Image (tube, rainbow, N blue to C red):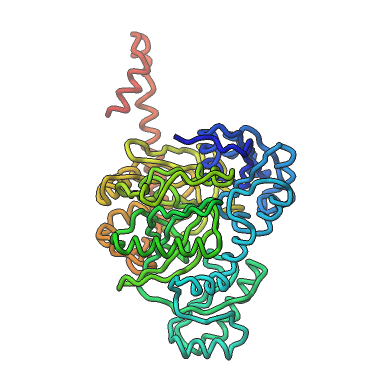
Amino acid sequence: MATRPERIRKVLIANRGEIAVRIIRACGEIGIPTVAVYSEVDRSALHVRYADEALLIGPAAARDSYLRIDKIIDAARKSGADAIHPGYGFLSERAEFAQACRDAGITFVGPSPSVIRALGDKMTARRTMVDHGVPVVPGSTGLIESLDEAIAVANKIGFPLLIKASAGGGGKGMRVVTRMEDLGSLLRAAANEAQAAFGDGAVYIEKQLEAVRHIEVQILADGHGNVVHLGERECSIQRRHQKLIEESPSPAVTEDLRTRLGDAALRAARAVGYESAGTVEFLLDRDGNFYFLEVNTRIQVEHPVTELVTGVDLIVEQLRIAAGRRLRYKQEDLTLNGWAIECRVSAEDPHNSFMPSTGRITMLSEPSGPGVRVDSGIYAGFDVSLYYDPLLAKLIVWGETRGQAILRMRRALSEYRVLGIRTTIPFHYRVMEMASFIAGRMDTRFIERDVITEPDINGEVATIAALAAALVAHQRRQEKAPAVSDAAVGVNPWKLSGRSWAR
């Protein structure tokens, strides 16, 4: 049973959407009051409604609100919050934010600024892993300072290769190079994008591995030297380096491989003195060889699948660790029970190159039932804007086996209704029906190779469909309306309404 951390009295959540709601719920279950911060466009957001207190921190644009360290620290002081949970995204992996919290005497729920800084620089992290026996992808031993250096690395490791930004993530500052003629232009493009996105144009080069899986290992580490891993997650179904579907465990990982992956993740954590929840990411090739990719120094979007198969509340554990408590688990206590799958429900149109979809959600019906969990930040009447990430909610299911989990996810997706905007629900349902996914045959190119999204219906068909829908709606209204003769003899209109639904 979860107990209240001893040194945290009130938590401010420096985030929004479903993750803010998730953190508020975790705090409520261990008796910690919460403070929400919000931008002007988020005045009626769900996290604002659920928190014990809420403070406005600025205009809609994230750079003027959720990314303003000074405003968030000021909100914590005004509300009396003695801890800040950053969630994911926004400021969650910014060492200067963690340092600002520390300087203000506020507990940052996450690792130390020095650890965030060391692991946030991918080149530094890569060198650290090499020094501690964690396998890395073949590539440059340092940052690429010139085209001549890039050519030398390309000649050594061969094509295809991947240019990567040393700072940041999310696919920005990355370019795949398949021939020498394109190396110079793509090197400049990656550096320019990295500079624009992260304020740091430094890049390095790795071998682009073909047909690899994206496997990540969840870790927990306290401030007393205790570190454990909670198994792996399969995150290979991605589009442009953005994960869409995750599961735990991975259908490709054997018990022996799980042990080796876990040991490597623990070495990575100990190498930097890690503290809090974190994720060590690897690439896994067809031969069972794995290579270090990066460490995410925050809670992950996909953390619920690990929670469902281990029974560990990762947010609560983050709070306990931040309060100076020791881990409650030893490695032998942690086993994987059953199978969990997560689908990210985003405001994107899968039939139109996943273009963002904005507008008001006019109707929302979320699935439920045994083994179904929905982490959501939306409701009917919620306005989806272009200011923030399109992620609306996460649908997570658990089953005794992977087959049962897939069937349960298919059933849950069929119940999920979001009207007013386009979402990725149809895409997820299609994947759940694909033979290659059911068989566990996937890698990071699964979507571009196996999933060909169907084009949306053309305008003429759409017009016909709209007219047909209008006619059906009119007919149903007519069926529900009682005739004069019926009313005269006392026929209950509610019964008529019930009969019309039964037809």
| Image position of 323 with respect to 253: above or below | above
Q: In the rendering, at what x and y percent does residue 267 appear?
A: 46, 64
Q: Nearer the viewer, residue 271 or 496?
A: 271
**Residue 192 point in image, percent of width and height:** 63, 75
The residue at the point 35 percent across, 47 percent down is 309
User: Residue 180's x, y, as percent?
Assistant: 49, 89
Depth order, front residue of 449/499: 449
When the figure is inspected, residue 128 is found, relative to residue 142, above or below; the finding is above
Residue closer to the observer: 455 or 69: 69
Q: Nearer the viewer, residue 476 or 382?
A: 382
Q: Residue 461: where, in percent of width, then height?
A: 38, 53
Q: Residue at x 33, y 20 (%)?
A: 496
Q: What count of labels does the image hold?
A: 0
Give the quarter of the figure containing the N terminus. top left
Visible residue check, residue 500 = yes
Quarter of the image that includes the C terminus: top left
Q: Residue at x 38, y 27 (%)?
A: 478
Extreme residue toward the top, this view: 489
197 sits left or right of 180 in the view: right
Q: Quadrant of residue 82?
A: top right
Up-down relation of residue 250 to residue 29 (above or below): below
Left or right of residue 86, residue 236 in this image = left
Residue 252 visible in rendering: no
Location of residue 7 with respect to 97 vertically, above or below? above
Side of 289 relative to 141 (left or right): left
